[in-house]
Image (cartoon, grey):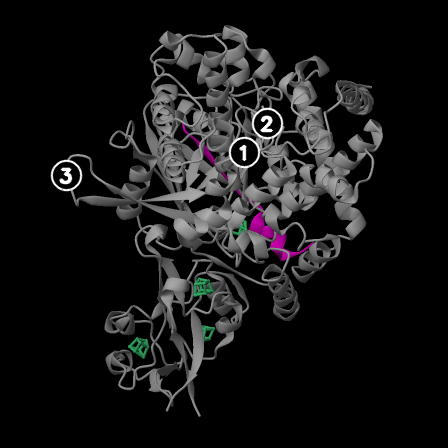
Amino acid sequence: MPRRLVVVDANRCVGCQLCVYACTSRFGYAGLSKSAIFVRSAGGVERGFVVIVCRACRDPPCARSCPVEALSLRSGGGVILNPNRCIGCGNCVEACDIGAVMWDSELEKPVICTHCGYCVGFCPHGVIALEEVV
Amino acid sequence: MVDWVKTLSRVLYIDLTRKIFWVEDRSDLFEKWLGGIGVAVQLYKEEVPRGANPLGPENAAIFAVGPLTGVFPMASKVIAVFKSPLNGYIAESHAGGRAASAIRFAGYGAIVIKGTSDRPVYVVVDGDRVRFRDAGALWGMRSSETVGRVLREALPGAGYRTIMRIGRAGERLVRYANVTVETYRHFGRMGLGAVFGSKKLKALVVIGRKSFKLPDVVAYREVFKEVFNLTVGPATRKYHDLGTAANVLPLDKLGALPTRNFSSGRFEGAREISGEKLAEESLSRRVACSACPVACIHLAAIREEYEDERYFYKTEFVPYDYEPIYALGSNLGISDRYGLLKLIKAVEDEGLDAISTGVVLAWATEALEKGVVDVGKTIVPLRWGDWRNYIKAVSYIVLQPNDFYQALALGVEEAAKRFGGAEFALAYNHVEPAGYHTGPLYHISLAIGLRHSHLDAGAYSLDQRLIITGGSLPEPEEAVRMIQEEEAWRQVLNSLVICLFAREVYGRATAERALKSLGYNLSQTDLVELGRRIYFEKHLIKFSEDFKPEDIVLPKRLFETPTPLGQISPDYVRRAIAYYFKTLSDEVKESTGRKSS
Ligand code: SF4
Ligand code: SF4
Ligand code: SF4
Ligand code: SF4
C-alpha cells in the first residue's frame, strides 16, 4: 500500500526544525535549504508554527503546470521529479497553493516531498506521520 | 584537515564606523581552536586592545558558532564575547533561538562587529550580502517585542533567520542590558545590550539559507541518530516537561532558593511560582531553539482586562525560566503568579537582564527598609511582594530620573558603593549572582569563574551531590581543582557549540565521535587539553585587564544565611580564592615570562 506524509497536529510543533534538517541530510547536506518540508513561525513563535509539506494531491496542480512533464504522478498521490527533465522554470512553485514546492537555489530546481518518511523519525513531538493511502 | 573546517572558517567583519564589511578565511583559528568560545577568545585578543572602553568604538561584539552548530541536535547556541560594561573584563554570553543556525548557514563561523555608528542603525546579513539600515524609526521604541515584530514583517527569510535586538535599556546604556533573540531568548548577562547601544546598533538580523555537503553522510547519520536518541531521553526530560522552572520546588525544599535578597533559602510562596503551578495555570506553548528536541522554552499566557473598559481583554505572552522566577520572584518576595509574570514581561520589554535587575531591586528594597536610602530616592516605596511598584522601578532603571536610579543602572556593587549597604549587595566582582544558595562550592565558583556565572562550572550540582550523599566538604584546594576541571571541560562544549542542557548528552566519547563523523581527528585527550588551553587563554586576558584578588569581595550576607550545607565559612572561601589566584598567577607569570624572554 502506498503511503504519504501527513501533518497530524501542527499545534504540537515546537519549531525545532529537526524534520527540516533530516530531510536536507537525505541529499548528503547539512542545513535547512534543500528540504522538502519547512517550518516557520505563524508570525511570532507565541502563535505557534506552520509546517509546510506536500499533501500528496490526487490531481496535482504542480504536475499540470510543468511545461516539460518533469513531474510524474506518484502512486498514492503527489509527484516524482525527474531532475534531468526539469528546466528550472519554477512554474510548479507558483502552482502549488500551499507552498509545498521548495526551491533549491544552488541547483535551481524544485524540491518536492517523496513521502519517504525519513523526517518522521526525528520529530520528537508527533507532529508528522506516515499514513497508508487507501 | 577536513573540508568541514573550511566551511566554518569564514569570519564576517562589520565596521559600524565606516559602514563597511569584509570576509576573511580564518582557518588558522578554527583549526587550532575548534570554534565557539575557543575562536571568539582569539578574535577578542586581536580586536579589543588593553584598556579599551567597554562602551567605546574599540570594544567589539564577537559572535561565534562551532563545528557541530546546526548539524547535531542541541548544538543550538551562539557564543558572544565582548568586554563587559558591567565589570570591565572579557565577558561571555550565550543565546539560542535561531541565531546559531542562521549564522552558520549564512556561511560564517564568526561575526565581528566593531566601531560605532554615528546614528542608529540595524544590520541585515543575508548570506553574502550585508546591508546597513537606518534605525531611526526603531530607536526609543518602548517594547523590544515591537521592534522584533516590525523587523519580522519588514524583512525576508522567515524560518531561516535570527533577529537580535536591544530595548531601551541597551540604548540608555544600562550596564546589564541584554540582547533579545527571537523574542524569547537572550544574550542575557554581562551587558551585551549596552555594548550594542553604545555602538548605536539597534538590531542584527542574520538570514542563513546555505547548506553544506557533509563529508561522510553514513557516519554522520549514525552518530546523529545516536545523539538524537539521547537528547529525547531522561537526561533532558525535566527541561522539556516543566522547563528550568522545575528547579523552584526542589531548591526551596533544600533551603537553597534565594529569597528576599538572599536573607533566606526558603520562600513561603514557592509553590505559587513553581514550575508545576505555572504549567498548570499559565503555560501556553513550548518552543525550541533550532535543532533542539527538548523545547525548554516555556511561554505563559496572561489574560488581562483593560481597566477602562469591561470585557475588553488582551493576552500577552511571557517566557519564564528558573532564573527570572528566582530573581524577580522569590528574591523580591513575590508569590503572586500574575504579578510575577507582569514583572518579567516589563523587564523583557525594556531589554534588561532579569537576574541583575532582580538583585538590584532586592538590594534597593532592603536599603529602603534599613533606612540606607529614603523614599525620596526610590521614588516608589519598594516593598517585598509589591510587584506594581517594582514594575515602575524597572522603568526608572531605564529612564534614570535621579542619581539613585542612575546608580542602579550601573549594577548593585556600584550602587552600594555610592549609597552604602555593601553587606547586602549581592555581587561577585560586579556581577549579580544567579539563584542558588546551595553551599560554598557554588559561591566559590561564582567568585573564581571566568564570567562569575552559575554556568561557568555548574557548581551548585557539586554542592547538591554533597547534600545528597552527606559527604564532607573537600579541602578548599581540592574544591578549586574540581571547579576548574569542570570549567575547563565546558570550554570544549562551548567551542562545539552545544547547549549546556545537553552537557550530559555530549560526554567526552560522544563529542569525539560527533567530531569524527565530520572528519575531525581529535581524541578525547586532545579535547580535554584544548579545554584547559582555552581556560588558560581567558585568564591571560583577564589578568592583563587588571583582575586582582582584591577585586573579589564577597558580601557579608552570604555568610549569614545558612545553606543546606550549613553556614559558609569565610575562612574556607578565603583559602579557596587564595589558592586559585596563586596557581593561576604563577602559571600566567610563567607563560608571560616565557613569551617576553
Ligand atoms: S507539491 Fe503541492 S501541488 Fe504538488 S502534489 Fe504536493 S501539495 Fe499538490
Ligand atoms: S517524507 Fe521524505 S521527502 Fe518528504 S519531507 Fe520527509 S524526509 Fe523529506
Ligand atoms: S520535527 Fe516536529 S516539532 Fe520539530 S519542527 Fe518538525 S514538525 Fe515541528
Ligand atoms: S534545551 Fe532549551 S535552550 Fe537548550 S537548545 Fe533546547 S530549547 Fe534551546
Foreground tag (2 vs 3): 2
* Label 3 C-beta lies within 8 Å of the nearest ligand 4 atom: no
Q: Amino acid at mark 2?
A: Ser
Chain under callout 3: B
Residue B127 visible to an observer of this rendering: no
Q: Amino acid at mark 1?
A: Phe
Give the Cα distance between marks 2 and 3: 41 Å
Q: Earlier in the sequence, mark 3 or mark 1?
A: 1
x then y, percent, for residue B441: 73, 32
Quick one: label 2, few (<14), some, or many (20+) residues within 10 Å?
many
Residue position for label 2: B264
Q: Quadrant of the C terminus of chain B?
A: top right
Q: Are marks 2 and 3 in contact (CB under 8 Å)?
A: no
Q: Is A38 left or right of B327, judged from the image as shown? A: left
Residue A69 visible to an observer of this rendering: yes
Q: Are marks 1 and 2 in contact (CB under 8 Å)?
A: yes
- Mark seen at residue B267: 1
x then y, percent, for residue B587: 81, 25
Q: Amino acid at mark 3?
A: Glu
Q: Earlier in the sequence, mark 2 or mark 3?
A: 2
Chain under callout 1: B
Foreground tag (3 vs 1): 1
x then y, percent, for residue A99: 29, 68
Looking at the image, which is closer to me, A71 or B468?
B468
Looking at the image, which is closer to me, B473 or B74?
B473
* Label 2: element kind: loop
Give the Cα distance between marks 1 and 2: 7 Å
Q: Quadrant of the N terminus of chain B?
A: bottom right
* Label 1: element kind: loop
Magenta stretch, residue numbers: B1-16
- Mark seen at residue B309: 3
